[in-house]
Amino acid sequence: MNADLDRHFPAEVWEEYVLGMRSEEDCKLLEEHLLICSTCQDLLVQADEYIRIMKAALAQDAPADPGGKPVTGAGSRKSLSKPFKASAALAGGMLLAWGS
């Protein structure tokens, strides 16, 4: 990943970050970039919302096993990572602080 912190990262990168599909090195770079870029903070919030909506829609459409629990396939996504939650909280706090 390019280490140019002055540019914005595309929505796809933030979606991969939310899904835990980026390397640890990439995550550190993205989290550093979030500290200075309100545009990418917004993209991260949008990516998180999009992923949550899609997961909820998939869960509603998933067939149930005899026990009534949704069946998830091998391709189901893992839950949001701790670094993401920390970054999202940091970004949200920064947005609140800047809005004051």
Image (cartoon, rainbow, N blue to C red):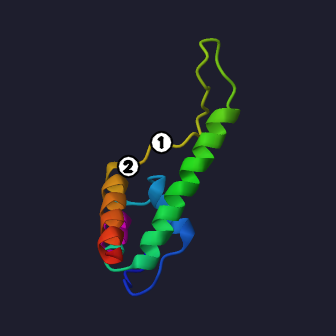
**In the structure shown, which secondary structural element does the residue marked by tag 1 occupy?**
loop
Q: Residue at x 47, y 81 (%)?
A: 8
Q: Is residue 29 shown above or below 19? A: below
Instruction: Please say if the residues under marks 2 and 1 sit with CB atoms less than 8 Å apart.
Output: yes
Residue bounds of the magenta highlight: 25-32
Q: Is residue 28 shown above or below 99? A: above
Q: Residue at x 59, y 49 (%)?
A: 53
Residue extending furthest front?
A: 100
* Position of residue 61 measured from the top left corner of the image (x, y, whole percent): 70, 34
The image quarter in which residue 40 lies = bottom left
From the image, tell me which residue sits under label 2.
Answer: 81
The circle drawn on residue 23 is none
Q: Is residue 92 left or right of residue 44?
A: left
CA–CA distance in space, label 2 to label 1:
8 Å
Q: Is residue 93 left or right of residue 62?
A: left
* Position of residue 21 measured from the top left corner of the image (x, y, whole percent): 47, 55
From the image, tell me which residue sits under label 1.
Answer: 78
Q: Can the viewer see residue 82?
A: yes
Name which residue type carries label 1.
Lys
Name which residue type carries label 2.
Ser
Residue extending furthest bottom?
A: 6
Q: Residue at x 43, y 60 (%)?
A: 22
Residue extending furthest top?
A: 66
* Position of residue 96 measured from the top left corner of the image (x, y, whole percent): 33, 68
**In the structure shown, which secondary structural element does the residue marked by tag 2 occupy?**
loop
Q: Residue at x 47, y 63 (%)?
A: 45
Q: Is residue 91 shown above or below 60? A: below
Q: Is residue 92 left or right of residue 67?
A: left
* Position of residue 69 measured from the top left corner of the image (x, y, whole percent): 58, 21
Q: Can the viewer see residue 21?
A: no
Does the magenta-highlighted stretch encompass residue 26?
yes
Image quarter where the N terminus lies is bottom left
